[in-house]
Image (spheres, rainbow, N blue to C red):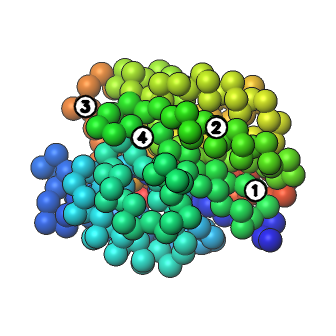
Amino acid sequence: MKKNFLIGQISDTHYVSSKEKLFDKIDTHNSFLRTIDACNNLDQIPDIYILSGDLIHDIEIYYHEFFNLCKKLNRPIYPMMGNHDVRSGLKKHLSKNLIDEKGNVNYCIDSFNTKIICLDTAIENKIEGEINKYSMDWLKNTLDRENDKHVIIFMHHPPINIGSLLFDHIKCQNGKEFIDLISKYNNVKEVVFGHVHCSYTTKINNIIFSSCPSGSIEYPIDAKDSSEMIEKTSIKLFNCSEFEISSKNILI
């Protein structure tokens, strides 16, 4: 079991076809190519990549091109559901061990000294998120079984308000229940989310809550409407050791 390892997180790429542009102006194909190139030229290459939702933008056919490009990362990838993903389409590209018996994309990565939990917060045909009862019970049972390792939880929707007019109303709707649950476990060290297209960090009950900025477009945290989007690409890196988890955002 590897004691020191690096996680790369890529979120909210909103990939559309190489022949199209997101909102008729954002070239997400080129953005993703730049992201891949930047990842492959880091001083230390991540051991794995977490793709924390909104991989594509609403249309299932985009997954074929997206996952072909992902092969260029040359590392294991762990995709997650976001509100712009298509569950039936994404599942065609996932191994069975990443999908639970109810069709949720809930899974753990146990190859390292830190336990990684990827939690599904997507609701069919909804922008806001929620952790359904099955997933919440699965999370509790998973945490009950893990006493020895630090735990980091990845999810798409934030379980908290971040002070954003654009995103606070479409966060994970039962975030308080989630926080009440994980706060009972001293080994849960960090919760990381996408969805908000900006950088944010806070601490609640000694747990760090942080966002991964977008792999396509970002919004200032105080943006009043979607017209304030910025074509900007970032990734997040987590350096995990036996004793601590540290993270940083990298602007591409």
Residue at x 30%, y 22% (from the top left corner): 224
Question: Does residue 4 appear left or right of residue 76 in this picture?
Answer: right
Residue at x 64%, y 50% (from the top left corner): 117
Mark 3 to mark 1: distance in Å?
Answer: 37 Å
The numbered disc on residue 122 is 4
Mark 3 to mark 4: distance in Å?
Answer: 21 Å
Q: Secondary structure at mark 2?
A: helix
Q: Residue 119's image quarter?
A: top right
Mark 2 to mark 1: distance in Å?
Answer: 21 Å
Q: Is residue 245 above or below residue 132?
A: below
The numbered disc on residue 137 is 2
Q: Secondary structure at mark 3?
A: helix
Q: Nearer the viewer, mark 2 or mark 3?
A: 2
Give the class, few, some or many, for how many residues have Cα within 10 Å of label 1's Cα (few <14, many ≥20): many
CB contact under 8 Å: marks 2 and 1: no
Q: Earlier in the sequence, mark 3 or mark 1?
A: 1
The numbered disc on residue 20 is none
